Amino acid sequence: MSTKILSIESSCDETAAAVVEDGRNVLSNTIYSQIDLHTLYGGVVPEIASRKHVEKINQVIKHSLSEAGATLEDMDAVAVTYGPGLVGALLVGVSAAKSLAYAAGKPLVGVNHIEGHIAANYIEHKELEPPFMCMVASGGHSHLVLVKAYNEYEIIGRTRDDAAGEAFDKVARAIGLGYPGGPKVDKLAREGNPEAISFPRAHVDEAPYDFSFSGLKSAVLNYLNSCEMKHIEINRADVAASFQQAVVDVLVANSINAAKDHGIRKLALAGGVASNSRLRECMKEAVEKEGLSFFYPSPILCTDNAAMIGAAGYYAYMAGERSPWSLNAMPNLKIGERPYL
Ligand code: KG4
Ligand code: ZN
């Protein structure tokens, strides 16, 4: 008998639901993206996101069950993201999941969004098992995580300031590319020279696996200002390519060092920035040089989705993790934290 989980994700600007079998087999993965709505404002507007989640969540859940050819009765559990993320947005998914699970008499499993991003790799790579090192880079988070076992995580490195995706979004705005910036910088950078401008690669002395991207962001803004003042024409593709290379170099170096120093032979990517083509290219090269194995999810599983929550939810469910009916949204939930257990 297989284990089927209905999973729900609403931590930011995607309203999503999925049905996942045995943690790795995706029967449906419905995503309603609000990006067009937020593009108008140059970023995610929390209240608009919450209101749109309220409007869409039931349709998205219904669609995902019907795509999977299943009903709520067929589910073994309902999994839902309860943090980290925008509090109002999270509450919509949490309330929907609680109502459905309670009404159908199914167990409720609260899932950490970042652990979900990591678990996207289990869907893509059926053979992948812990331990492995995972570089999680998204719009709100940049972490190097040692996945010691299913449900067991150790944070090896973190960002001191901006997340990698946030830096992409801010630089994209500065060069007039709009929101969301990551995919646009990625595309424009293909026409530019990554060595055209020398931007800093931050290194945190006492914490060799930590990141810092705010200095790089300031360096890009200063470069753009000084060009403007001197009436020098800006080559936006060169700026995009040089900035992107600076981010990628740090992500690659820290990931490889962390894996090697901890004696881990498997390296995975996760989160929205894991879709970056240059990051994948450079990481692949570095990993091959070191003789490590490399894993990354396809783009649809890198950005926010509910299938990844179903994958993480499955391993939590199998380990006996159950959330109480008092489960609340936790906007600052930490990786590996289990406040309800
Ligand atoms: O994981 P995600 O969908 O949402 C969060 O949990 O934050 O990540 C979104 C972030 C955004 O900052 C977006 O600009 C970035 O991922 N991103 C990329 C690319 N695609 C998305 N950054 C660089 N290159 C990309 N191709
Ligand atoms: Zn995310």
Image (cartoon, rainbow, N blue to C red):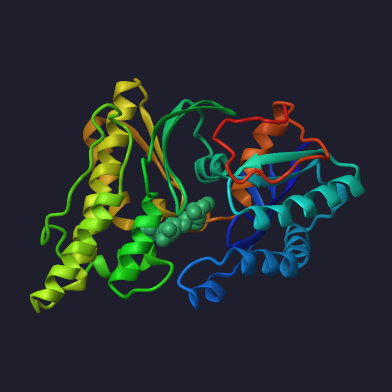
260 w.r.t. 310: above or below: above
Image quadrant occupied by the N terminus: top right
247 w.r.t. 179: above or below: above
Q: Give the percent coordinates (x, y) of residue 313.
A: 67, 39
Q: Give the percent coordinates (x, y) of residue 170.
A: 35, 63
Q: Residue at x 21, y 35 (%)?
A: 289
Q: Give the percent coordinates (x, y) of residue 306.
A: 63, 53
Q: Residue at x 65, y 43 (%)?
A: 330
Image quadrant occupied by the C terminus: top right
Query: Quarter of the image holding residue 321?
Result: top right
Q: Give the percent coordinates (x, y) of residue 265.
A: 36, 26
Query: Quarter of the image holding residue 186?
Result: bottom left
Q: Residue at x 62, y 50 (%)?
A: 307
225 w.r.t. 299: above or below: below
Which of 233/289 is in front? 233
> Quick check: 91 left or right of 174?
right
